[in-house]
Image (cartoon, rainbow, N blue to C red):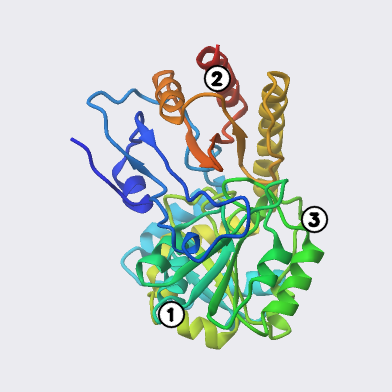
Amino acid sequence: MSSQLTRRDWLRASGLMTAGLSLSRFTPAEAAPTAEQTQSTFANEFAFTAPPDMPKLRARLLANENPLGIAPSAKEALIKAADSGNRYAWMEFGQLKDLIATDEGVKATNIMMSPGSSDILMAAADNFAKAGGTILTSAFTYDDLLRRSEKLGAKIKAMPMTKDYKFDLPAIKASLTPDVKLVYIVNPNNPTGTIVPTAELEAFCREVAPKVPVFIDEAYIDFYEPAERPKLGKLVADGQNIILARTFSKIHGFAGLRLGYAIAQPDMLKTLHAYTNGDFAVSITTLMAGIASYKDIAWQNHCRAENAKARSYTTKALTEMGYEVIPSAANFILFPIRMKPKTFENQMFANGIGIQTREYNGQPFCRVSVGTSEEMVMFIDSFKKVVG
């Protein structure tokens, strides 16, 4: 029996739902999209036909999760907070907001908590697409917000990426028209793992945000080296109309605990709050674990270093086999494959390795999450068997 599920439904329902996962992505034209192309329908990120016998995964490398789990300090805080599980989180929100505000150079009133960043993306889609208009973005990026916006009647104008698979900010800026309601940028980008240089992104925001809101999805921002990490909170502090969406699901390992936040102008947060429960959608147990994890810089550094090590090993191994790997700054790798996506997926899953595939300009790609070093060895060994 086949079933079509959304990303969140799929993650909720699977334990993990493994083999037979088939993905299709929005594919742009090489040149700037025509009016018809900008209205192209975005496919579900996870769309699959469940096979009768799903093999058990040896390596779960398809959801960009942190394979090392949550910090021991976060686990301790989570267990301790269970005694308060009969209470709603209330005053405790201030503790985490103050920590974030200090790091980002903003005020606590510039921050709204949420269960992961998905609620923030959906709230933005609900608000900016409700009266139609256009959402301006890149052709090869994370599309939850885009699909929701399209369903609500907005047009999606997706500009082709640069030759090195990055957001083409000059092209996006040149495509601004009066009907553009929101500019959507993912940095680091998913699924390419590429980043926009901080100075270029900051200059873009300062020029564009006074004309139209700029939404920057920074789900993978914590995988930057700390000294290189962009601090766009200063743009919010300067009054710029940008929205930063963050999640604890990645380096903090909170994919199942659900915690995230938005940084924006207070009026914008009030607008978005109308479409979500905001702070109070977060449980006190998750919140207290989040406070502990945010403070645990040593664990974040450990996870970042382990991710970089496993990512480097995998990139080197694939390169040595003659595959061109897109340089990634995140916890996943994208590279072109030489097999039909469905065939490749089925054979990798048959080997117990969960991955995803994408298509861009007719070229199939594999997107593999970075697991532990041991898991990436299993991935490479299985990959060699599958591709021959």
Residue on which disc 1 sits: 273
Q: Residues within 10 Å of mark 3 (few under 14, many from 20)?
A: few
Residue 386, relative to residue 134: is it above or below?
above
For the question of whether residue 86 can be seen, the reply is yes
Q: Quadrant of residue 262?
A: bottom right
Residue at image coords 48%, 37%: 62
Residue sitting at x 32%, y 37% = 15
Tell me the kind of residue under disc 1: His
Could you tell which of marks 3 and 1 lies nearer the N-terminus?
Answer: 3
Q: CA distance from mark 3 to mark 1?
A: 31 Å
**Crowdedness near tag 2: few (<14), some (14–19) or many (≥20) residues, C-alpha within 10 Å:** some
> SS for tag 1?
helix
Quarter of the rendering containing residue 47 = top left
Depth check, mark 2 against mark 3: the one in front is 2
Q: Amino acid at mark 3?
A: Glu
Cα–Cα gap, marks 2 and 3: 33 Å
Q: Residue furthest bottom?
A: 267
In the image: residue 244, left or right of residue 356? right
Q: Residue at x 72, y 31 (%)?
A: 312
In this figure, which residue is indicated by the disc labeled 3?
228
**Three-letter amino acid code of the residue under disc 2:** Phe
- How far across and how far down the image is residue 42, in percent? 42, 55
Of 49 and 122, the residue lying toward us? 49
Label 2 sits on residue: 383
Q: Nearer the viewer, mark 1 or mark 2?
A: 2
